[in-house]
Structures are given as C-alpha cells and as structure tokens.
Amino acid sequence: MSSARNLRSLLYILCFPGFTCFLSAPLTNAQAQQPSAYAITHAKIFTLAGSPIEDGTLVIRDGKIAAVGSSVDVPAGAQVIDAKGLQVYPGLFDAITQMGLSEIGAVSATVDTAETGSYNPDVVAATAISPSSEHIPVTRASGITEVLAVPGAGGGRGGEPGILGGQASAIHLAGWAIDEMLIKKSVAMVLNFPEIQTQTFDFATFSRREKPYTEAKQEYDRQINELTDWMDRARHYAQAMEKGSVSKYDRDLKLEALAPVTRGELPVLVFANRARDIRNAVEFCDKQKLKMILAGGEEAYKVKDLLRSKDIPVILRPMLSLPLDEDDPYDRLLTQPAELAAAGVKFAIASFDNSFARRLGQQAANAVAYGLPYDQGLRAVTVNPAQILGLGSQIGTLEQGKLANVIVTNGDPLELTTDVKYLFIRGQLTSLENKHQRLYEKYLNRPKTQ
Amino acid sequence: MTVSHGTIEHGSVLIKDGKIAEVGPSIKAPAGALVIDASGQFVIPGIIDCHSHIAAEAINEGSVSVSSMVSMEEVLNPDDIDIYRDLAGGVTSANILHGSANSIGGQTLVIKLRWGQPASKLPFEGAMPGIKFALGENPKRSNFSVPGQPRRYPATRMGVEETIRHAFSEARDYKKTWDDYNKRVSAGEKNLIPPRRDLKLEPLVEVLEGKRYVHSHCYREDEILMLLGVAKEFGFKVRTFQHVLEGYKVGDEIATAGVGGSTFSDWWAYKVEAYDAIPYNAALMTRRGVVVSINSDDAEEATHLNQEAAKSMKYGGLSHDEALKMVTWNPAMQLGIDKRVGSIDVGKDADLTIYNHDPLSAYAVVQKTLIDGHVYFDREKDIANRAEMEKEKKALTEKLKKAEKKPEEKKLPDQKPEEKPKPPASVTTPTAPQAAASQGGAL
C-alpha cells in the first residue's frame, strides 16, 4: 500500500514539473494575469539602505522596485496591498544551499549535488536544479526569496568531495523553468581546499584512522601541486584564447571553465573551517591572484585580521552547530559573528542545506542573541550575501531599480514565530502555499475516528 | 513560567534541600539563603529531552535484530562534553536511548545532567526503565549496509512486525515458565529447578508486566498502527512513539491508545520516510489529544529545544503554554517523572532554567541551569573562567612540546603523555552538595 503511495507521489513529481510551485488557484496562469504593478502601502519598510521608513509605500513595476519612500504616489492600475501594521524587508538570501540539487538526502536517485572525480570546474549547478523540488516552496514560505545552489561542496566535516566542485548558480525561489529562476548562472567556483588530514574516517571498518603528520602533509602538498598545475594550465589556456590561437589547441572545457577564475573574474568559493586550512587557502589564492570567498569558516575568528586585511568575505556555516573541539567554549560558533563584525570582516550566514534552509532567520537571530548587533544579523541574510556574491547591484536591498524580491511580514523576519504574509519574487506576488501546509490542511480536516 | 499554573510576574521560587519549597509573587528569602537575583529574566522548569544519545559510549548493538539484553546504564560516560553543552542549553533531564538499528533495541535510561558527578549519580532516581524499539527504514537497513555482512532479517516492514511478534511470543512463553515455577514454589513444592534466566527476554517480560516503558522509533503511519496492533495482541502498552513524523496522519489512533508522541520540530526530507514530515506535526497531534513533546535526538539540537518548541506556535497555532509544555511537562509525563519534574510546583525537584528573554524566542540565552537546587551551569561563571582555562591549556601545550623536543633524554615519568586539558565546563560544576541550608532564591 505504502509503496503504491510512494509511486503515486513519484509519478506526481515526474508528470507535473513546475506545477507544485504554483499550485494555489489564484496563481495558475500567473504570468498572464498578474498585474504589472503593485503598491505596498502604510508599511514599516526596512530598505537596508538607510533607516527604516515608517508608514511607507513600496511600488513594484515590471519585476523591479520602482519607488520606495514615505511620500510615494500609488501609480494608476497598481494592485494595492494595505500593509498597515506589517513590515517590509528584502527577501532573505541563503548564500549556500543545494536547492533543487537534492530532494531526499538518503535517496541517491534524487541527489545531484556532487560529481565523481576531483576536478570538475565545468559542471554548473543550474543544469541540475529541479524547478519542481518541494524544497523550493517550503523554503520560500519562510521568507527566503533567493539562494545560491552550490555543487560539489564539502566543508571539511565528513565525506571527501572533490577539489574543484563546479560552478554555483544564484536562483530565485520561483519560476516555471530554470531560465526564469536564474539570477546568475555562474556566480562562483567551488574549491574544497585540501586539508592536512591527520585523522580520517575509514568507512570500511567504521573507525577513525590516525595518519602521521608527515604523511598527511605529503598528501596535502601533492594536492596543492595538482591544483596549482590546474591553475597554471588554465592560465596558459586563457592566454591562448585571448590571443585567438585556441584553434591551435584542442578545446578543453574544464580549462575553459577555469579561465575566468584565473583572471580573478569568477570568485572561488573556498570551503575551509580550520584556521590552518583558511591560512593556507588565503596564501594560495593570493599567490594565484584569485578572488576568494571563504565558506564554512568555523575558525574564521582565529584569522579575522588576515581576512580583514585581505578583504576576504565569509559565508558562515550555521552557528547552531557544536563547536569543533571539545575544549572550545560551548558558544564558540554562536559568538563568532559578533567577533567578526567587530573586527570588520564582512560575512553572510547560510544554511548549507535544503531542508534546514528555513532555519536561516533562526541562525541569524541566534548570532544576535550572542552579541551581534541586530542590524548586522539582518544584513547577514540579505544584503551581505548579495554583495559577497557580486549581486549587490541587483538584489539585497529595497532600492529603486533593484529586483523586487520582497517580503511582507507581521514582525521580525528572524524571529521563530513571525509569519510571512506576502512574498514577491521578480516583482510577482508568489504563493506561500507548499507541501507542508497542504498536508497540514488535509489532516487537520481528517474526520474524527473512533 | 510554572507551566502548571500560569506565569507569575516578578515571582520568586524558594528552594530547600533541592526541592521547590515555595513559588509565588512575594516570598521572603530566609536568613542564610543564597539569593539569585533574576530581575528581568525568565524562569522555567528545566528542559526535558525525551530522546537523546549524549553521555553514551555506544549506541547500537547492530549484530542482532533483538538486542533487549543491552543497557544504556552500562555505557554511561559522565565526561561526555555534550552533557555540559546541553546543560548550557537548559536541559536538566534526558532519556538516553540506543540507536534505531534493531527492531527491539536496548534498555533506555533517564538521566539528570549532573555534570561533574560520576556515572552512578546520573540516573534519574526511581524513573521507570524503558526499552527502545525501532520501525521502518533503519531496522530494515534501507539506507546502509554493514561492510562484509549479508543482508539481515528483517529487510521489510513486514519482517519488522514479525521480529517483534516472535520476540514477544517467546517472552510470553518465558513468562509463563517463570509464573508456573513461582506458583509451584509458593505452593510449597520443594527441590524444583528454576528455569534458566534469559537476559534477552527478561526486559520484554517487564514490558508485558507494565514495568518497562516502550519508546518506539517510527516514521510512517502504517508502522505506527502496526505496533499498536502488536501491542494489543500481546497485551502491552507503548509509552511513546519517537520521531513519529507521520503521527499527524493517525493522531486519533495514537491518542485512543494513550501513547505519547515525541517528535522533531521541523526536520524533513533526509530520507523517504521523512518526506511527508511537516512542522505542524506537534500541533496536529496535540489537537487530537496526544501528549506531545519535542525532542532532540542530537546533542546540538538539544541546546535550543526551547526554540524548537516555539515553532509549534507558528506551525499550527499552539499557545505559549502549550508550546512550553512540549519540552517540560509533556516529556516528564511521557517518561513517568512528572511527579518529580516538569513544572514549577511546591514539592518538585528544583530543576530550573533561567533565560534572559522569553524562552520561546530565538533571542533567549540560558543564564543558569539548576538541578536539585544546585547551579550546574552559570553563563557568567563560564565566561569568567575562560581566560584561566586558556592559560592552563597553553601551559600544558608548552609542557608537552618541551617533552616532545627531547625524547632521547632519560625518560622521566612525569614527561609521559600529558593529560588533555580539561574542558572549561568542569569549572562550573558545583562543589559538594550543599546541606540543609541549600539555596533559596528570589528568582
């Protein structure tokens, strides 16, 4: 009986791509029927580009923010949303997820997160993102309007992913097909920075194995040499391309993908947690003249001055995690954001997950509880990720001309009990309906038995 | 926030001999009492985690499908740092269970998080013992295989049911053998040979006799009803369904059977049987009359169970009190320890957690955690001790480095491997339990 039911839901997923995202009735044929302009009025507006506006109006037209302020006229024909008593914020931005790349963690058939092999600079997340993933509307309902979908990411805590994991794609959490969802196809190159691993986990015997330092260091050096070689070859390849002599070479898609990295145009999203690994990564990126974004960064506080001096931003792993070491203070990860902020390191907070993406606000709030100024907590999940990923001119604040990814809430969007009342993506009023709420309503209405 | 009788603004709690002596709006601290000024703060009953794996040296005895002979009490590790971390998250009691590798797992144990005390002092005195069952993907090993081992029975949910039925069938026969023997002994028969003890079946007999709680890991609605059916067939009770992520689909059936539901706040989609998990589960089961708790199953998750409980207000509209009960009174009831803990009432153990904000907020930080009237966690002290700990660690590291640099020299016994620096936690453990004076508090 149960497997039949599963089969049905599988068929459902297979047969109706896109359908689940827009199930609610008013939004069927949304593209045709949606008004081109909205005015959200009488709201407290947190633009994150200046102080909050009391009793303000935000006008959305053709997908963008047309006007925002305390004395803005409502354009003729605009659909008006009276938001008296409500608050308006930029939608939240989850800067590291596997959105659309993984549906059910334990079922490999639904997982497209990481390729085999160590060097896959040519693979692109956007290719494998499933627009009808149930995670998308579930995540959206918590006020997250855009995410970075990251392939091949490790992070140094278990698993052994490749070194160059592929290209991360920034997407809106709405759209019938991937082209509509894309903010930018190639945002950063994933680099799981090699670690000097003296401890490994052997899955065959299910036990830890100790490796002597010299042996671990040798392995590390080998990986760094290999990585350096990739960069050198990509640089030479890029030079050949620039000189128009590529016809003299066989086309190499991997090197071609890596070329913008070597030119410093495409940032590297470097996954590293330990201070030693971060230092090594900074040194490597410096030498190679790469544009580095640190991801993970659980010991970023130990190298905060280095990060600040090199202007390297950090996308932090969830602070609701246990400290790395037994003798770390119990709140080590919770106080880190405050410490980084005080040191002037720019950072975002991200979920590094799909099903826990909706805890993004909670993570930021916990950082605030442990000393991060509230304003910075909010910025860590809105404008900072946008800026860090080079999308700051398009998204992240409520300013005229920016993409209208906007949420209207009944309170602080970081607080556990706050509800999102309206949500706009690319200026379209987007459904908050999702699998969880559907099941809730279905079983809320199950007739009483016995 | 008493949980049992509302919230008292500017209230006080008087603690004597580890018990709550008075609760009310105006209590005079008796002479000699230690006063904790909690002005502007929030006091709740200590958090109870109905599903935890902290303080355990081993989790699964994965070699057999029925491992009722193994017990958590035998593998308690009082030095597990996660005890302190969860204490810092306001947890005072926890149900320590085996993993979910087997249809019938091992014997569970309720502990108090008395950090710094030996293993013998951790068990919650007088708490009913329990046993872990597990249904679904884990016992049938859907998502993993043990290297070098063939597939194991059960491999389907059908087999899981039969594994449990076989075990109870044996247990019933075993019980009968003993009952007959005891009857003959009490009838005065002499020189009888007692039946051979069976350590696997003994705990199951206790289940049949209502002397041991069944805490069953489960996900899907069908397997929930399956176990209710088996329990009915053999005449035992299931005490709690653990995880019970599809509990909302069969809330009436669970409530009618009088079984508790202990679930996650918002975990989902990590495996197929969690794909229909919804954050409304706690609220929906509550509305059908199930006693529901939110558990952690994870040392980290346990550090913010207050926040996880708060989500039941957002998802399903439970009240503040109902939400708070999810991690205090309800788990106490599920573990049968509600006479002792779970609310702030006179006569109960003084297990209290103090926050700087409303605990059902993401901005609330635990300031102090008390067990039996003793402060086992104090955030201020923890922070104050950090510099000292850091210094001690550095000194030890230096010493170790020196020792390593001259390995050829004559080996002195004190240059043998240094002890690992102690975690900062140990500093905040209470000194010897204070005697009668105990602590009174204007909390």
Image (cartoon, rainbow, N blue to C red):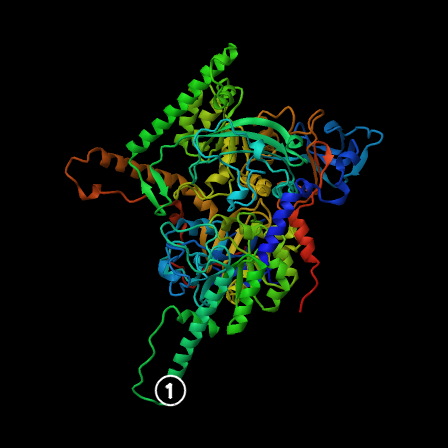
Q: Position of residue B124 (x, y in %)?
A: 44, 63
Q: Position of residue A112 (x, y in %)?
A: 53, 38
Q: Quadrant of the C terminus of chain B?
A: bottom right
Does the image show residue B205? Answer: no
Does the image show residue B403? Answer: yes
Q: Quadrant of the N terminus of chain B?
A: bottom right
Kindly identify the amino acid type of the residue bearing the numbered disc 1: Arg
Residue farthest right in this picture: A76
Q: Residue at x 36, y 46 (%)?
A: A204
Q: Position of residue B375 (x, y in %)?
A: 45, 54
Q: In terms of image quadrants, where is residue B343?
A: bottom right
Q: Mark 1, residues whose alpha carbon is within 10 Å: few (<14), some, or many (≥20)?
A: few
**Circle 1 SS class:** helix
- Subunit ID for the residue under disc 1: B
Q: Position of residue A64 (x, y in %)?
A: 72, 28
In this figure, which residue is indicated by the disc labeled 1?
A: B184
How many numbered tags mark residues here? 1
Tell which of A28 and A272 is nearer to you: A28
Residue B374 in the image: above or below residue A196 = below
Tell which of A32 and A93 is nearer to you: A32
Q: Residue at x 62, y 58 (%)?
A: B248
Tell which of B49 and B27 is nearer to you: B49
Residue farthest top in this picture: A243
Residue farthest left in this picture: B410
Q: In terms of image quadrants, where is residue B198?
A: bottom left
Q: Residue at x 77, y 42 (%)?
A: A26
**Horizontal relation, residue A245 to residue A221: left or right:** right
**Horizontal relation, residue A196 to residue B286: left or right:** left
